[in-house]
Amino acid sequence: MDFILTLLVSAGVIMLLAYALPQVHVKSFMTALWVAFLIGLFNATIGWLLRGVLNLVSFFLLEAIIGLIVTVLMIKLVDKLVGNFKVDGWWPALIIAIATAIALALVGWARGGDEEYAKLDNQPRLEQYFAQTETTEANTIRFI
């Protein structure tokens, strides 16, 4: 479900920026959906390798900036591969990358994206609490 929502939000941002920026051209929403899928696929494969190498060079100090640069490169790669999608220049590709990242972060925040982590984080604390009360009760019984 998260994958589908991410694709729809990314395609929506691409369509919105196609209407807002004269340098971005998208034929239809299906094209924007296909572009969002390809950008995600390339980010997960080629982008992963590029981010790994570039983060090693920068000693992981510029991780967010490198992630944006790699996303811009993937957008330009998809621009060359898809005929109904055109981005004229690097600045519009950077705007698409930033807008998509912000939109996905807002959707994740609105959905409460870290609920599974919170559930996992609370579980050991609850077990530790019960373990401490059992040992405390055992200690008080011994001292009486």
Image: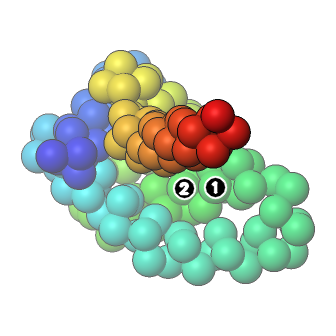
Mark 2: few/some/many CA within 10 Å (<14, 14-19, 20+) = many
Marker disc for residue 52: none
Q: Return the x and y of residue 116 as percentages of the image width and height.
A: 35, 42
Disc 1 on helix, strand or loop? helix
Q: Which residue is the site of mark 2? A: 71
Please state which amino acid type lies under the numbered disc 2.
Answer: Thr
Query: On the picture, is 30 further left or further right than 109?
Result: left
Mark 1: few/some/many CA within 10 Å (<14, 14-19, 20+) = many
Tell me the residue at 82%/54% (across/down): 62
Asked if disc 2 and disc 1 are in contact, CB closer than 8 Å, the reply is yes
Q: Classify 44 as above or below 84.
A: below
Front-lying residue, 89 or 46? 46
Distance of label 2 from label 1 (alpha carbons):
6 Å
Front-lying residue, 79 or 104? 104
Tell me the residue at 30%/63% (across/down): 38
Please state which amino acid type lies under the numbered disc 1.
Answer: Gly
Query: On the picture, is 17 further left or further right than 131?
Result: left
Scheme of image coloration: rainbow
In which quadrant of the rendered view does residue 79 lie? bottom left
Can you name the residue that lies furthest to the front here? 144
Tell me the residue at 46%/65% (across/down): 43
Q: Which residue is the site of mark 1? A: 67
Q: Return the x and y of residue 32 as percentages of the image width and height.
A: 23, 45
Q: Is residue 22 visible?
A: no
Q: Quadrant of the C terminus?
A: top right
In which quadrant of the rendered view does residue 17 lie? top left
Q: How many marks?
A: 2
Q: Is residue 133 visible?
A: yes
Tell me the residue at 57%/39% (across/down): 141
Q: Classify 76 as above or below 68.
A: below
Q: Return the x and y of residue 135 as percentages of the image width and height.
A: 58, 45
